Amino acid sequence: MFQEQGLSIENWMKIQQSLSSLCGFPIFIYDPVRKRPCSPATNENDICILVHELGEDLACFEAYEKNVTRALDEKKILFYRCQANLTYFIIPIFLDQGVQYAMIGGQAYLSEADVEAFREKAIRWGISSSRLSGLMENCSVASEALQLQKARDLQTVGTLLIENVYDQNRYQAKSSCISTLTHIANQFKNDPDLPAHYGTLLNSIGILFNLESTAVFKQSFPEKVYRKMALFGKSMSESEPASFFLDGLLAKGKGDSIPVFVDDPGELGEAGFPTSVRSCFLFMLSENDQLKTTLAIFNTDLSDEDTEMISTFCLQAGVVFDLVELKNHISEQKKNIQSLSTLTAFNFHLEEKVLYKKLLDQTTQLLNAEQGSLMMFDDEKEELSVMAMTGVSPALYSLFSKKMGEGIAGRVCQSRSALLVKDIAEDERIPYSPRSRYKTPSFLSVPLIKNEDPIGVVSIADKVDGRRFTEEDLSLLMAMGSFLTMAIERSHLHTTTEILKEISITDSLTGLLNRRYFFERLTEEIERTKRHGLPTCLIMIDIDDFKVVNDSHGHLVGDEVLKWLSQLLRNTIRNIDVASRYGGEEFTVILPNTKTVDARIIADRICTAIEEKSRFQKKVPQLNLLTVSVGLASFPDDADSIHELIKHTDEALYRAKNHGKNRVVVYKDYHAC
């Protein structure tokens, strides 16, 4: 698709519409890699639409593929005639980095003879004469010379515009990356756990910039050597020397020339790096009390843009880290192992994402671990989606989704079996690959089961003390898995209950309040009127000749009319007013604290708005002007009870019906007469 090549379909469609209007021909973009259109045709010919409806479009796609390939190979505009005798032009488009597209347009006849040839073919296809006549009225005839001229113009302008959209989206991607980094850095300032921030920083940068390895080094006192605080990737390991000598490398930078790049083996060796480190970028994070904290990126080629973004991020993150250190004066995380019973203190009415994060945080603490993830099975996407993950920004969660049976989590979920891996490099059940995010080779993964069906997976890695997980750890996590399932289901039940509560008072078609809830609200307002002496008015609305709409155009069109009118009511009444669907094509509006004269203004506004805006010409050209009749009564002026208020409002409505429709009738106006 466009997005995978740095193009936005939304941005392009606006441009495509303008190009189509200027040249007078339908156009669309074709992707030769996927062998299908990657933008819908603009102003598509009615004959082409008919071919699609008849299921005769297989030949169209075969023709696209064949002729687009020719145009790209020959690097020139080509013409071809389709099965409906329409002539198409194909414009090859070449972008940077070998990206290719084709712009296809035309869909016009070269001559009246082509038109007649299609007419004969359409009759053989079984097209009725009446429909065929309608199609022929709008068919376009254009000479090959005219189409060629338009195609050449499109090739010049279209290529430039696609290049512009392509470049624009590259800049947007860069902006999105900067925005993500800024968001990640801002998350640090409210959490005193500085070591955890280092890990999040490395994981985030490592994923965003596809780094082989990166680490945070902090200068120690009084030795002034640098110690490794956090590591991402495989270029170094936990067994490497604990002390490094980076001042010599940092001295190579002059003022604003930081970051420093070093690829000299001798200099890297003197700094204490192992031979697996072939090159190194050094970015300054912070400097407190003349002690420096540095970000190192190993064995990775960075573009100037990437270097600039990482430098800016380090500057911002460094300021935040300095603030955290000043507040807490603590460089290591202290975790309190709590008992399983503390989980019962959770509020299961929390918003889902907050609950998932709290449950995962508690689980990792109880198992004395640093890394963890909680994934839930999404029935619609048919995949496991990350709901919470330690050490990774929520902005990156979507990168870790897995299909059932895919990856470790997918297989655990599919098999419904818990997994203890003491060393991933030695475990034959797991295809070994370096796990750059993790410090240790041991991890746990447990399925969450409900009624014998898997609903998710919780995984834990990296014990704080660096040791491997044990069978006891697995038993604890399995016990916690049962509780996690219960907690999540209780949260879902609460959410479902709230949804059902809303459904029980809402009309499913229009989204307005239903008749049952209308009576409850009207009762409340009448009681309030009795207490405070403020009037309550009731409006009853009926669509004029609605049966004719259903009989002439079908109930689906009738439903669209009801939904449209409901939305218009929402947009027309005040915030304090209560609109309901009373039944069929009848609606009501309760107007609290409203005098009859003011209610009449609102009723007239509704009536006029419907009359002015009700033509469904785009959807149903045959639909005549839609109007409504409206009845209005007030409590306590026109009624002594709810029953009487509804009865008198209904009488006013039917008086409006019987006196010409499309009008508002107030009960007291005719009753007084």
Image (spheres, grey):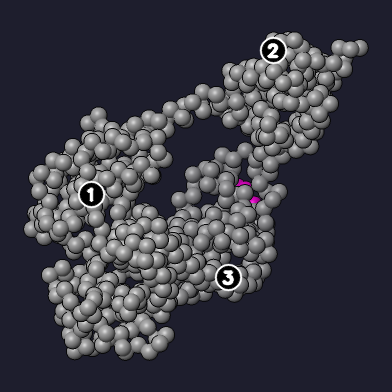
Q: Where is residue 384 in the image (x, y as percent from the top left)?
A: 31, 46
Quick check: 635 above or below 333? above
Crowding at dot 1, Cα within 10 Å, few <14 / some 14-19 / many 20+, comes out as: few
Q: What residue type is labelled 3?
A: Leu
Give the secondary structure at mark 2: helix
Crowding at dot 3, Cα within 10 Å, few <14 / some 14-19 / many 20+, comes out as: some
User: Closer to us: mark 1 or mark 2?
Assistant: 1
Q: What residue type is labelled 2?
A: Ile
Q: How far apart are marks 3 and 2 (CA)?
A: 65 Å
Q: Report the residue at 49% width, 47% height from top.
A: 56
Q: Quadrant of residue 125?
A: top right
Crowding at dot 2, Cα within 10 Å, few <14 / some 14-19 / many 20+, comes out as: some
Q: Report the residue at 40% width, 76% height from top.
A: 311
Give the secondary structure at mark 1: loop
Q: What residue type is labelled 1?
A: Asn
Residues drawn in magenta: 116-120
Q: Name the residue under label 2.
A: 642
Quadrant, the C terminus: top right
Question: Which circle's residue, 1 or 2, is located before the other in the chain?
Answer: 1
Q: Is the residue under label 2 in contact with that under label 3 (CB below 8 Å)?
A: no
**Residue 640 seen in the figure:** yes
Q: Position of residue 398 (x, y in %)?
A: 36, 53
Question: Which circle's residue, 3 or 1, is located before the other in the chain?
Answer: 3
User: Closer to us: mark 3 or mark 2?
Assistant: 2
- Asked whether, in this view, residue 379 is left or right of residue 517, the answer is left
- Asked whether, in this view, residue 246 is left or right of residue 671, the answer is left
Quick check: 179 above or below 246? above
Q: Report the residue at 18% width, 37% height from top.
A: 479
Q: Mark 3 points at which residue?
A: 161
Quick check: 53 above or below 642? below
Q: Quadrant of residue 318?
A: bottom left
Q: How many marks?
A: 3
